[in-house]
Image (spheres, grey):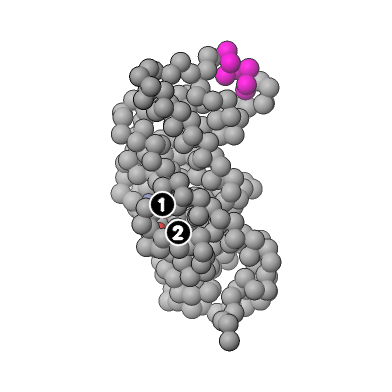
Amino acid sequence: MVKQSILDNNQRLKQEVDAVAEVAGYLWQKGWAERNGGNITVNITEHVDDAVKALPAISPVYQIGTTLPHLRGCYFYCKGTQMRMRDLARWPMDNGSIIRIMDDCASYVIIADKAVKPTSELPSHLAVHDYLLAKGSPYRASLHTHPIELVALTHNKKFMEKDVATRMLWSMIPETKAFCPRGLGMVPYMLPSSVELADATIKAIDDDYDVVMWEKHGVFAVDTDIMAAFDQVDVLNKAALIYIAAKNMGFEPDGMTDAQMKELSDVFGLAK
Ligand code: 13P
Ligand code: ZN
């Protein structure tokens, strides 16, 4: 007999998890997901029906490490810690799980399908989801990944200065600013999975970025759904590749002019 999955009787939930699996495959194909690198969480609370709410815990109660008042009773799909994106792409419910936040807003339990412990970056992911809900944001997905060229940029102090990388990347190809209109925030190096990193990530997102760099580590991106979060990182990394291609041809790329950038902002109605 085939074992039942929480997704079997919930089409909307299945669609969300299928999208995570699709993006996980892209991350592997792009070379951004070595070993267990990167993680994804999606706030799936709006897809949770009474049958899911009635499911018992299949894990002990785990502490988040911080208290997140807006997450009471929320549900998340989370990549499992130490799990590979390339495996998650094929078997999302063996390499990730669904968690329920407890009433104390400081702990959670796993409810399905298997007791796969969520990503070590859960403090950052959940703190960001808490922040987004508090702000009334429609964003429900967060993505952490290791895009090679964007990470390489952060090994140069110049690009860690506010909006230096943003301006360079936007000027490489017009689509970058159009489809990543808030640019690239910068978070100085902090220990992976720490609450300090979570706090700094929120501060950067609050400064009005959808995508922030963790220095010498990776990006953290938020958007309405996981495909949209992936797209923002993808356009930024494409711009970094164009910059590198020009440098490899032996010259510093000119970049679009300030007038061309302003025209783009006016036509697309971009704030920055
Ligand atoms: P996890 O396997 O715990 O998700 O960690 C991967 C990672 O990229 C940590 O920053
Ligand atoms: Zn990482």
Describe the element under mark 2 as helix, strand or loop.
helix
Residue where numbered disc 2 is placed: 86
Q: Callout 2 environment at 10 Å: few (<14), some (14 to 19), or many (20+)?
A: many
Q: Amino acid at mark 2?
A: Arg
Image quarter where the N terminus lies is bottom right
> With respect to residue 40, does 102 lie above or below?
below
Q: Residue furthest front?
A: 249
Q: Classify 24 as above or below 217.
A: below
Residue 33: image tag = 1
Q: Give the camera-side residue of 51 and 72.
A: 51
**Main structural element of the magenta stretch: helix, strand or loop?**
helix
Indicate which disc, 2 or 1, sits on the residue closer to the N terminus: 1
In-front residue for pair 62/99: 99
Question: Does any portion of residue 170 appear in the rendered image?
Answer: yes
Q: What is the secondary structure assignment of the residue under circle 1?
A: loop
Going by the numbered disc 1, the residue's amino acid type is Ala
Does the magenta portion include 263? yes
- In space, the residues marked 2 and 1 are separated at their CA atoms by 8 Å
The reply to whether residue 124 is in sight is no
Callout 2–callout 1 Cβ contact below 8 Å = yes
Ligand 1's quadrant? bottom left
Q: Position of residue 10 (x, y in %)?
A: 67, 70
Q: x, y (%) of residue 158? A: 34, 25
Q: Position of residue 109 (x, y in %)?
A: 48, 71
Residue displayed at 48% across by 70% down: 94
Magenta part of the chain: 259-265
